[in-house]
Image: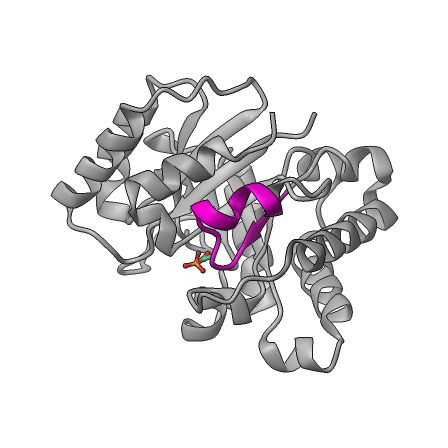
Amino acid sequence: MRKQIAAANWKMNLTLAQGEKLMDEILATTFNMGANQQAIFAVPFPYLLTMQQKTVTQKNFFCAAQNCAAQKSGAYTGETSAEMLNSIRVEYVIIGHSERREYYNETDTILAKKVNIALENNVKPIFCCGEPLAIRETETQNVHIEEQLKAGLFHLSAAQIENFIIAYEPIWAIGTGRTASSAQAQEMHAHIRAVLSTKYGAAIADTISILYGGSVKAANAAEIFAEPDVDGGLVGGASLIPVEFTSIIQSLKK
Ligand code: PEP
């Protein structure tokens, strides 16, 4: 069975002390997670080593960076390379979050480079795609998502794409309290899997975990995650509240 994943995106929130308290509270919970279930914490760069040391002893728990540089190394002040992430054994990196695309002008070309450099350094990308409200309103979201997937991923080989994580995050649902219905999520996730299977075949498309992101919380997680093509969630706001995120982890399919 595909991995079922609850991924927390702390974004630019919390001090180190607040982050440690949150992580310690979550890790103190008994989850009885299955072999196919994971919780991933995308924390701010300065906390990665501390949080990685907390999760490394916990089966099924991992850390992620929220971004990485498109370049290998060198004179890029303020950037963090995928090689650096790998050197502290960070397993995952979010690439292409809509906030990075919008506020930091990360184009499809830049994102494809980031995907490549992450894979070269054994850091697994959590690749985000999603449409703005204007696209949803004209019902052209399927084409929009297909274009993002083709531009960001279709240069990869089948071996590289296997066990990839994709997050579908409709921009109109991020941090807005407005959630896609479980039917809307399922429809898009099935579309994403169909797009992937045109390039890589159904068997490989079937191995790829597709997370839903956009105002997931304890109250709606189980319903959304129950959809057959939804393999968990990428969670912003609710991941900062221990009781919310523990419940979201507990809502993953077994
Ligand atoms: C996100 O930023 O990835 C996200 C889904 O945020 P929120 O859960 O707050 O909508």
Furthest residue to the left? 17
Q: Is residue 65 found left or right of 132 in the rendered image?
A: left
Quadrant into which the C terminus falls: top right
**Quadrant location, ligand no. 1:** bottom left
Residue that appears at 22% across and 46% down? 46
Placement of 124 over or under 144, stated as above or below: above
Quadrant into which the N terminus falls: top right
Q: Is residue 200 found left or right of 180 in the rendered image?
A: right
Image coords of residue 89 (percent x, y): 37, 29
Residue 1 magenta? no
Along the line of sight, which residue is nearer the eye, 35 or 49? 35
Furthest residue to the front? 219
Residue 218 magenta? yes
Along the line of sight, which residue is nearer the eye, 114 or 28? 28
Along the line of sight, which residue is nearer the eye, 251 or 131? 251
Residue that appears at 76% across and 66% down? 142
Residue that appears at 33% across and 17% down? 57
Image coords of residue 110 (percent x, y): 54, 63
Count up the numbered dots: 0
Placement of 63 over or under 143, stated as above or below: above
Image coords of residue 48 (percent x, y): 28, 39
User: Colour scheme in the image?
Assistant: one colour
Image coords of residue 209 (percent x, y): 64, 39
Along the line of sight, which residue is nearer the eye, 157 or 204? 204
Residue that appears at 56% across and 39% down? 119
Q: Which residues are magenta?
A: 210-223
Placement of 253 over or under 45, stated as above or below: above
Displayed quadrant of residue 103: bottom left
